[in-house]
Structure formats: structure tokens, C-alpha cells
């Protein structure tokens, strides 16, 4: 059984725009019917979850594509571990920078208001 793009979007709880983007990025490969409309296999719905998790983690399309391709090979872990660890380190640095900025902003708020409560919180 195959699904139209709208049926798959509904089933996977994503937009048709997201599915088209994933296709354009080479992250999934739907078949096409006689008039060129995308057709998805019903059993492939979990693939969208595999794509969305790395996107949500801030991975770029090319790395998601590499992970998807390499993870199907028998001895792929060493080849995909390095770029994933690199991205993990980048995100960790970004998180540290954001935490530092947040701490600085809290200090400014305290200096201005004399309060240590979060903005918008009742004092």
C-alpha cells in the first residue's frame, strides 16, 4: 500500500512542505506515480522520525544523509561516530556560550531591578 504526500504527512504528523524538503535534500526517496506525484510506502513512516530527530538536534542535511546511508552498512559506526561527536562538541560549546550570556543577562537584571527572580515572574 502506498500513501500520497498528504496521507504520509498526516500519518507522520509533519507538513507536506517538510516531506518535500526531505526529498530535495536526498533524505528519502519516494516513488512517483504515472503523473509524477510522490508515493510513499506505508511501512516507511518511521523514516521521518529518523530524519526529524537529527534535524531537531541541529544536524545539517548532509550529515543526516551520511548517517542515514552509513547506518545501513555493517561496520558503519566508526565512520559516522566522528562527525556526530564533532557536532556534539559544537553544540556543547554553543550551550556554554548561551549559558554564559544568560548568566550575564541575569546579572544585569539584578543590577537594574535589585531582584534575582526570572523576568515576568511575580516577586
Image: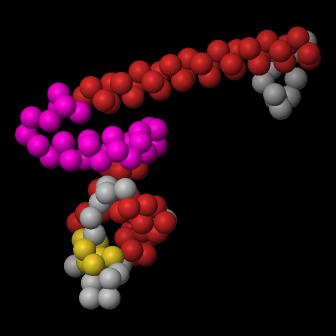
Residue 102 in which image quadrant: top right
Task: Say which residue appears at 26% left-offset and 41% top-offset.
Answer: 67
| Boundaries of the magenta span | 53-80
Q: Quadrant of the N terminus?
A: bottom left
Answer whether residue 8 is visible to the viewer in this image.
yes
Q: Quadrant of the C terminus?
A: top right
Is 122 displayed left or right of 29 in the figure? Answer: right
Q: Main secondary structure of the magenta part?
A: helix
Residue at the outermost bottom position? 35
Task: Say which residue appears at 27% left-offset and 84% top-offset.
Answer: 33
Residue 30, position in %: x, y?
28, 69
Q: Can residue 70 be found in the magenta stretch?
A: yes
- In this rendering, the answer to whether 15 lies above or below 95 is below
Task: Say which residue appears at 83% left-offset and 15% top-offset.
Answer: 108
Answer whether residue 42 is visible to the viewer in this image.
no
Which colour scheme appears in the figure? secondary structure
- In this rendering, the answer to whether 109 lies above or below 6 is above
Residue 82, position in %: x, y?
27, 26
Task: Say which residue appears at 41% left-offset and 42% top-offset.
Answer: 60
Residue at the outermost right position? 113
Residue at the outermost left position? 74
Is 21 displayed left or right of 38 in the figure? Answer: right
Between 85 and 123, the residue placed more toward the observer is 85
Between 45 and 97, the residue placed more toward the observer is 97
Between 6 and 81, the residue placed more toward the observer is 81
Residue 76 in which image quadrant: top left
Residue 75, position in %: x, y?
9, 35
Q: Can residue 8 be found in the magenta stretch?
A: no
Is 93 displayed left or right of 98 in the figure? Answer: left
| Count of marks placed on residues | 0
Amino acid at each position: 500500500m502506498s500513501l500520497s504526500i498528504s496521507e504520509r504527512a498526516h500519518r507522520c504528523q509533519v507538513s507536506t512542505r517538510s516531506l518535500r524538503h526531505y526529498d530535495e535534500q536526498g533524505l528519502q526517496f519516494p516513488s512517483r506515480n504515472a503523473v509524477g506525484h510522490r508515493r510513499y510506502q506505508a511501512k516507511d513512516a518511521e523514516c521521518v522520525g529518523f530524519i526529524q530527530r537529527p534535524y531537531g538536534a541541529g544536524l545539517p542535511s548532509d550529515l543526516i544523509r551520511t548517517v542515514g546511508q552509513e547506518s545501513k552498512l555493517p561496520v558503519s559506526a566508526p565512520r559516522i561516530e566522528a562527525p556526530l561527536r564533532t557536532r556534539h562538541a559544537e553544540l556543547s560549546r554553543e550551550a556554554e556560550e548561551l549559558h554564559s550570556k544568560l548568566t550575564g543577562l541575569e546579572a544585569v537584571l539584578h543590577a537594574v531591578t535589585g531582584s534575582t527572580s526570572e523576568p515576568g515572574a511575580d516577586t
